[in-house]
Image (spheres, rainbow, N blue to C red):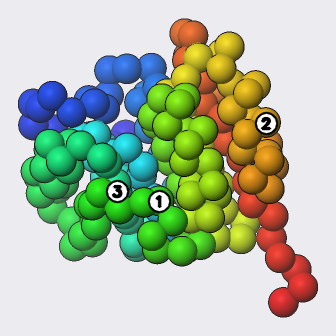
Amino acid sequence: MLVLSQLPSAAFGDGSHPTTRLCAGAVDLLCRQRAPEAVLDVGTGTGVLARIARARGARFIAATDIDAAAIQAARANAALDAHPVEIEFSGRAPDHWGPRFDLVIANILEGPLRELAPALSRALAPGGVLCLSGFTRLQAPALRIAFEAQGLTYWTEAALEEWVLLALRTTIDLSL
């Protein structure tokens, strides 16, 4: 079991909301199963998902948020861990680093997810996994369609209470 200390803050993602629990479980499982080199946490809030990825062995972790107070809270929380790998916290767009990430996790509301669909898709490396949460069961089908329109393939989903986590994948280019 992974235990991470956390400072009190107003930032989202303290671990109590069902979407954060869904995402935390997905990051933990996928990091243990797939050992991603690079992980991107979009809408990082307190930074808990980025910290899980770091604790599970990711070597490059970027975490973004549009809220400067959330970035500050996430940095403070990450500093509590005795870990040699730094997390790059910023307000940058998800595709700022190019198609680098084996795992991208975005736990934000449905509207921003729709707006960010192209940028989130462009951030994924070939064979990468995108996990989305922050929306309800009723919103999931439309989001799935929006991300499939970006060239991603539906993989699986999970639900907790009325909240959903969707996982999609990029294809692996075998022509190389």
Q: Distance between the residues labelled 1 and 2?
A: 20 Å
> Label 2, on which residue?
145
Q: What residue type is labelled 3?
A: Ala
The residue under the point 26% across, 60% down is 89
Q: Mark 3 or 2, which is nearer the eye? A: 2
Please give the residue where the numbered disc 3 appears in the rendered image.
63
Q: Is residue 37 visible?
A: no
Looking at this view, name the residue that lies furthest to the bottom: 176
The answer to whether 78 is drawn above or below residue 157 in the figure is below
Q: What residue type is labelled 1?
A: Pro
| Residue 124 drawn at (x, y percent) | 62, 64
List the single residue furthest toward the front. Answer: 115
Residue at the disc numbered 1: 94
- Category of crowding for the residue at label 2, using alpha-carbon neighbours closer than 10 angstroms: few (below 14), some (14–19), many (at least 20): few
Residues at marks 3 and 1, CA–CA distance in whole angstroms: 9 Å
Nearer-N-terminus badge (1/2): 1
Task: Please identify the quarter of the rendering in which residue 172 is found.
Answer: bottom right
Work out how far the residue at label 3 is from the one at label 2, CA to CA, in angstroms. 26 Å
